[in-house]
Image (cartoon, grey):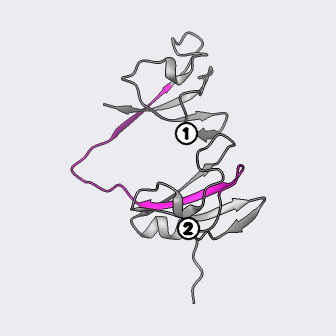
């Protein structure tokens, strides 16, 4: 038997793993896995709770503070081009100190690189000087 990791499968198969933190306002708090509205091609494969790995089943209840790992099919469509570009928020930027919900609706910020960390933004995320924005070119 050969032991593999999530990364091994992501590198060799058409699956991807993503993670998310469940905060106290998330609608999944207090719900059983079997009652979550997941897309049919997405599977909740791991819950990290208090530094313990939990393999969930349908009766597992999601708690605030849980870190979840989801598995789904990779996006592979050779006919579809997705162009991303980077833009840095400098001190003269019109976006500095604004939340994403205040920005032009034609802009989609896919992720933000801030102080050597990568974050997936929400509408409440405030853009700071020196943030590197990864934007989707529409």
| Stretch of the chain drawn in magenta | 62-87
Going from N to C along the chain, the mark reached first, 2 or 1, is 2
Q: In this view, does 108 lie above or below 95?
A: below
Q: Which of 59 and 134 is in front in this view?
A: 59
Q: Which residue lies furthest to the left in this view?
A: 79
Residue 50, quarter of the rendered image: bottom right
Give the residue displayed 25% in from the left and 46% down from the top: 80
Q: Which of 134 and 100 is in front in this view?
A: 100
Is residue 83 a member of the stretch shown in magenta?
yes
The quadrant in which the C terminus is found is top left
> Residue 97 placed where, x, y %?
61, 16
Q: Is residue 40 left or right of residue 138?
A: right
Is residue 89 a member of the stretch shown in magenta?
no
> Residue 20 placed where, x, y %?
60, 50
Q: Say few, some or many: other residues with alpha carbon within 10 Å of mark 2 (under 14 / 14 to 19 / 20 or more).
A: few
Specify the label residue 6 is tagged with.
2
Give the residue displayed 59% in from the left and 28% down from the top: 125
Specify the label residue 110 is tagged with.
none
Is disc 2 placed on a helix, strand or loop? helix
Residue that carries the numbered disc 1 in the rendered image: 120
Q: Residue furthest bottom?
A: 1
Q: Is residue 64 above or below residue 43?
A: above
Residue 119, quarter of the rendered image: top right
> Residue 55 placed where, x, y %?
63, 71
Is disc 1 placed on a helix, strand or loop? loop
Disc 2 to disc 1, how far (Cα)?
20 Å
Give the residue displayed 52% in from the left and 56% down from the top: 36
């Amino acid at each position: 038997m050969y032991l593999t990791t999530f990364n091994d499968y992501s590198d060799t198969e058409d699956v991807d793993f993503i993670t998310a933190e469940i905060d106290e306002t998330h609608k999944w708090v207090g719900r059983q896995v079997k009652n979550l509205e997941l897309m049919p091609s997405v599977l909740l494969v791991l819950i990290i709770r208090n530094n313990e790995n939990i393999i969930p089943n349908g009766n597992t209840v999601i708690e605030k503070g849980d870190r979840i790992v989801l598995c789904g099919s990779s996006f592979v469509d050779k006919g579809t081009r997705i162009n991303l570009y980077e833009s840095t928020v400098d001190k003269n930027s019109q976006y500095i100190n604004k939340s994403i919900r205040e920005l032009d609706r034609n802009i989609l910020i896919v992720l933000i690189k801030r102080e050597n960390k990568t974050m997936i933004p929400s509408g409440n995320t405030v853009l700071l000087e020196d943030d590197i924005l990864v934007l989707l070119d529409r």
